[in-house]
Amino acid sequence: MNSSPALELRDIHLPEPISWWPPAPGWWLLLFTVVLLAVVFWWAYKQRQKKRARRDSLKALADIREQFSHHQSPAKLLRELSVLMRRSCITFYPRTLSASLTGEDWLQFLDATSANTAFCDGVGRALASAPYLPERAQHSIDSQALLDLCETWLRAQPSKHYLASMRATKTRSGAQR
């Protein structure tokens, strides 16, 4: 046939190298799974922290209750409960919401984060002035009712409806400016 020595043949053409982008669907699925697992683990960790904080606070309250059965000092009980409630508030809620509250504002915060008004209108009122009274001051409180009130408050925390209302209030006040 045609046996011409000068045939102009081209060299072998290799395909283009495989690009790393866009990844194959399996890689997208793996990335989605890793992100989903990270979110689930983070959420579970946060839930565990909340439960641990509540459990630790309730254990501290049980210790206060037991110590009170030995020392029977209402002044010491009020101070210990006041400290426990403040520490718990700082743990359950942002520090800016509860750390600086005193007096009537403190009691209103406790009532707003619980299902009752026993802090402003009931036995919980003693917590407002307890840290400021002298050691030997005489207190006439129903210690069992106060301990039960604090336990009820701790078991109900953190109060999501209060945080939602605070966010809504901040949003409304920010929109008015």
Image (cartoon, rainbow, N blue to C red):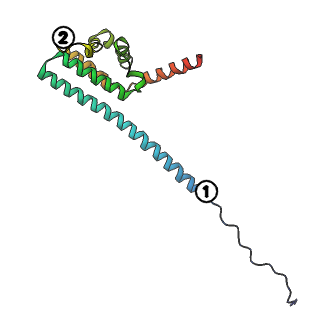
Amino acid beneath label 1: Pro
Circle 1: element type: loop
- Nearest the viewer among 28 and 81 is 81
Q: Nearer the viewer, mark 2 or mark 1?
A: 2
Q: Where residue 93 sits: x, y (%)? A: 39, 26
Amino acid beneath label 2: Ala
Q: Residues within 10 Å of mark 1 (few under 14, many from 20)?
A: few
Q: Which mark is residue 137?
A: 2
Q: Where residue 133 sits: x, y (%)? A: 23, 12
- Whichever of labels 2 and 1 marks the residue nearer the N terminus, that label is 1
Q: Where residue 130 sits: x, y (%)? A: 25, 14
- Nearest the viewer among 33 and 109 is 109
Residue 141 sits in quarter: top left
Q: Which residue is mark 1?
A: 23
Q: Residue at x 31, y 35 (%)?
A: 52
Q: Is residue 90 above or below residue 120?
A: below
**Quadrant of the frame with the N terminus:** bottom right
Q: Where residue 48 sits: x, y (%)? A: 35, 38
Q: From the viewer's perspective, is 159 left or right of 124? A: right
Total number of numbered discs in the rendering: 2
Q: From the viewer's perspective, is 53 left or right of 94? A: left
Q: Residue at x 76, y 78 (%)?
A: 11
Q: Distance between the Cα atoms at labels 2 and 1?
A: 74 Å
Circle 2: element type: loop
Q: Is residue 126 above or below residue 90?
A: above
- Nearest the viewer among 106 and 152 is 106
Q: From the viewer's perspective, is 105 left or right of 38? A: left
Of all residues, the one furthest to the front in this rendering is 134
Of all residues, the one furthest to the left in this rendering is 70
Q: Residue at x 30, y 13 (%)?
A: 128
